[in-house]
Image: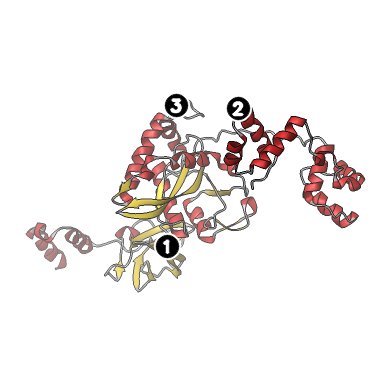
Amino acid sequence: MATTDLEIRMTIKTLAAKGLPRRAIARQLDLSEGTVRYHLARQAAGALDGRAHQPRHALVAADAIAHWMAHHDRSNLAALHAWLAAEHGYTGSLRSVQRFVADRYPPPPRRARRRVETPPGAQAQVDWAQFPRMVVAGQAVTLHAFHPVLSHSRFGAVVWMPAQDSLCWLAAHNAAFERVGGIPAVLRVDNTKTAVVRGAGAWGQLNDSYRRYATTVRFHVDACAPYSPEHKGKVERAVRTHRGVDLARQAWDSVDQLQAATDDALRDSARRRRCPATGSSVFDAWQAERPALAPLPILPAPFDHVATRRVGRDGLVAFEGRQYSVPFAYLDRPVEVRGAAGCVQVLADQQIIAQHPRHTDCRVLLDPAHYEGPSTATVQAPTPLGRMGRRLQELAAMPVQHRPLDLYAALAEVAR
């Protein structure tokens, strides 16, 4: 039987006033007909619930409660209940204290909410949304949508990912920054474990890989306070809006096809929506905001293997059985080498200084530009290439069928 609380009693009264039979009311509310008849009779007689006139259980501690309320904030009634139990032997429940205070004391003042418009390029907000049972390549799969939204222009993107693990988290950031066209100064995130490994909000401890990623890309991570979705309301609104898009209800040949269609749909939506901060379209506001975003660096790829190596005298670092060149200025310095999907990235001072293909057949991978440039205060530049070296580079850059005979003759002349 359903609980006959005040809402049920008012519903019975309303349905009876509309002429609905008692049997139909009972069937609709999943009550017995006798229960409906009983409440209608009490309402007709003007009977009152006797429990409303019973003294509050917390009345025995009224003086102690008055002393507490005079010296403490009313918002923390749990602390009041704990104090009554420890200092005065109170045996009642927290709910009894809450009812007593609500009857005897005025409600606490309501705090006004400050509305702030974020300056261009200052902040973006990000969040995840899950889309189960999406049809991709004929299979029902669960996809996760990463939502970044620029707080000033309200321009955003959606990046589809197969999971919400650390590698997908970082890969989604890379794709998001490419779509918004730069790096905001601050990224406001939720307290997901890929961002905050322990604690929450301003006192949370950032995930090590995410902290290193943010330092490399150069943005500040601002974790929201727990249970405060209003602190990133712009992206929360975007998540609610995009949950109803038709793209999630269609069948797709691949995730790439879905991503391309999503990018086009969001660009069209940005041209139609109006930016509250500027009055122009979201797309035009985004174009005006882009110069305030930091330019895109070489974005660090999500990696599954990392090692610290010292740069050799020939400007090479060893990693996974191969040697990779780095700029000669880092001679004899320790660098961080990351093995990512399809590439090897070398970092120094939290900046990417070299990038090479990963898992190639070559055992030595060189970038000639790493050996060019002026000397530094601690490292002298390598000896410049001679005529033979330059000619050999020209020859290697040409397809075999296009190499002229006079180039071979010039090489032979140089070699004499």
> Mark 1 vs mark 3: which is more N-terminal?
3
Q: Measured from the top left, where is residue 256 in percent x and y?
A: 32, 50
Give SS at disc 2: loop
Q: Residue furthest top?
A: 279
* Residues marked 1 and 3 touching at CB (< 8 Å): no
Q: Residue at x 53, y 35 (%)?
A: 119
Q: Mark 1 and mark 3: span between their CA atoms?
A: 40 Å
Q: Residue at x 45, y 64 (%)?
A: 336
Q: Which residue is mark 1?
A: 303
The image quadrant of residue 273 is top left
* Residues marked 2 and 1 touching at CB (< 8 Å): no
Give SS at disc 3: loop
Foreground label between 3 and 2? 2
> Mark 3 vs mark 2: which is more N-terminal?
2
Q: Measured from the top left, where is residue 148 in percent x and y?
A: 46, 44
Q: Which residue is mark 2?
A: 18
Foreground label between 2 and 1? 2
The image quadrant of residue 206 is bottom right
Q: Which residue is mark 3?
A: 280
Quadrant (top left/top right/bottom left/bottom right) for the C terminus: bottom left
